[in-house]
Image (cartoon, helix red, strand yellow):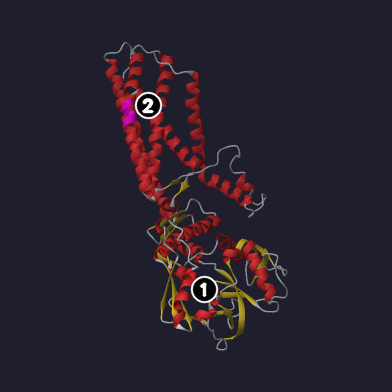
Amino acid sequence: MLNIPLWNRVLIWGVVALGLAFAMPNLFYPRVERHNDGLAAVEAGLASAEDVAEDVAGWPGFLPATLVNLGLDLRGGAHLLAEVQVEDVYAARMDGLWPDVREVLREERETVGTIRRQPSPDDELWVRISPPEGSDAARAAVRTLSTPVSSLTGVGASTLDVRAEGDVVIVTLSEAERAATDDRTLRQSLEIVRNRVDEVGTREPTIQRVGDRRILLQVPGIGSAEELKRLIGTTARLTFHPVTGRGGEGNVEAGARELVLPDVDDEGVLYRLEQTPVLTGEDLSDAQPGFDQNGLPSVNFRLNTSGARTFCEFSQNNVGAPFAIVLDEHVLSAPTIREAICGGSGQISGNFTVESSTELAVLLRAGALPAEMTFLEERTIGPELGADSIAAGEVAAAVAGIAVLVFMVASYGLFGVFANIALMINVGLIFGLLSAIGATLTLPGIAGIVLTIGMAVDANVLIFERIREELKTAKGPSRAIELGYEKARSAIYDANITTFITAVILYVMGSGPVRGFAITLGLGIITSVFTAIYVTRLLIVIWFERRRPKKIEV
C-alpha cells in the first residue's frame, strides 16, 4: 500500500522550502544586490551605515540574500587575454645575482684578479677577470651560488650554468631553472591578478592559465576592457635606490650600472640612481591609503622583518645622503636621510588624489607583477548585450516550459499536473542551489537549464508508463502506483547517473562556458531525480489519501 512516513514528508517539504527560499532573492535581483553591496561597503569601511541605510533596508535581514552571479555574457564586462613576458624575470634574476657573484669572486681575488661586470644580454651575466688563467677558479667560485632546482621536473639539476670564454665568466639560468621560473612566474602573476581584481570587489571573475605563458581574464560588471587593463597592466613596481646625481635634461647621464629616471611631478628634473635597488615592493608587508602632515593624500607602508633590517642598515650607513622612492620608473620623491630609519614603516607622498592613493595602495598590497603582461585580445561586452541574452534565454526557457507542461497534461491528465508542479519546483531548486554555492550563470548555463526542463519529465514519463502497465495486472490503483515507482526507479537511476557522469567530465575537462553548462546540467539532474521520485510521489499519495479512488486513469 502507498505509505510515506510523517518524518519523510516533513523532510521532503523542508528540502523544497529551503531550496525555494534560497531561490527567492533572484526574483528581486536589483533590490537584493543593492542590499548586499551596502553591507559589503560598511564591512570594508567604504561607507557608513547611515549612507547605505536605504539600500540595506530594501531587503529583510532574516531572509536569504544570496544571488546567482551573472556571467560575462549576461551581465556585461571585460575580456582580456594576456601574455606574460617571462624573459623579464631572467634579467631581474641576473641583476640580483651580481652582488653575490662579486662577493664570492672577491674572496678569490689572488687567483681571479680584478673583477668587472661587462655589458651582456638581459638573460646573462658577464664578468671579466684580469688573468684568463683564473677562469677555472672563478667558475668554481660562482658555481657555489648554484642550488638544486626546486621543481619536480628539475630533480637533480642546478639553477645556474657557468662557463668561461677567455677572460669572461658567463652566468646563465639552466634550462631546468628557466622552466621552473616560467611556471612560478605564471603562478605568481595569476595570484597577483586575482588579488587585484578581488580588491576592486568584482563578482565571480574568471582568471585562469591558458597554455605556458598566457592568462585569460573575464570580469563581469566592470566598465570596459581599458579599465581592466589599467588595473591589471599596472606593474606597481616600488623600489628604493641610492641617488648619485640630480639635474635637468641634458645635464644628467647614466654611468655604468646606473639609471636616469624622471621626477613624477616635475617634468624637467632627472635623477641618476644606482641600478640595483636597496629594497623592492617584495619587502612590503602592508600598504594603506592615508594623509600626510599637510592633510594631502598619501600611502603609508610597512616593511617586513628582513626589509626593515636592510633599510635600517642602509640608512645608518648613508646619513645625509638622498635616496629615491621609485614607482614604475618614475621618482615619487627623493628625501635626504636625516637619521637612521629603523621603525620598519614609512610614507609615500606625492601629487595623489584620494582615488589614486587608494589604487596605489591596492596595487602595492597585492604585490608587483613579476613580469610585464602584453594584451593579445580584449573585448568589452556591454550590459545591453547581456540583457538581450537574458531575454533570449527567458524566452527559450518559457517556450520549452510551456511545451512540456502542455504535453504532460495532454498525455497524463491529472498525473501530468502533478508532474508539472514538480517541474516548477525543480526549476526553483536549481536556482536555489546555484545561489547557495555561489555559482555563476552564463548563457550556456541557461541552455543547461532549458535542457533540464525537458529531461526533468523523463523520469515521470517512465513512472507513469510503468503505472499504466501495472494497472492492467495489479490489484487496485494503490498497488499499481507503488509498483510503478519501484520498477521504474532503476531505469531512472541508470539514465541520470550516466548523464551526471557526462556533466562531471564536461566540468573537469572544459573551461568557461562549457563549465557553466556542466554545472547547471549536473544540478538539474540532482533536482529532477529528487522531484520525480519524492515530490511527485508525495503529491500523488496526498491526493490518493484524500480521494480514495476505486479507479484511476493515467
Q: Residue at x 59, y 44 (%)?
A: 58
**Placement of 70 over or under 403, stated as above or below:** below
Q: Secondary structure at mark 1?
A: helix
From the top left corner, tell me how far across and down residue 157 is, in percent: 42, 62
Q: Is residue 63 visible?
A: yes
From the top left corner, tell me how far across and down residue 364 is, in percent: 58, 63
From the top left corner, tell me how far across and down residue 530 is, in percent: 41, 29
Point out which mark residue 417 bears.
2
Which of 2/375 is in front?
375
- Magenta segment, which residues? 490-494
Residue 308 left/right relative to 414: right
Residue 491 falls within the magenta-colored stretch:
yes
**Placement of 535 over or under 273, stated as above or below:** above
Quarter of image, res 465: top left
Task: Report the mark closest to the observer, 2 or 1.
Answer: 1
Q: Is residue 257 visible?
A: no
Residue 209 left/right relative to 484: right
Q: Amino acid at mark 2?
A: Val
Q: Residue at x 70, y 73 (%)?
A: 316
Quadrant where the image shows the N terminus: top left
Residue density around tag 1, few if under 14, some if 14–19, many if 20 or more, within 10 Å: many
Q: Residue at x 61, y 83 (%)?
A: 245
Which of 376/287 is in front?
287
Which of 66/347 is in front?
347
Q: Amino acid at mark 1?
A: Val
Query: Label 1, on which residue?
Result: 101
Q: Secondary structure at mark 2?
A: helix
Disc 2 from disc 1: Cα separation = 82 Å
**Placement of 11 over or under 296, stated as above or below:** above
- The mark nearer the N terminus, 2 or 1, is 1
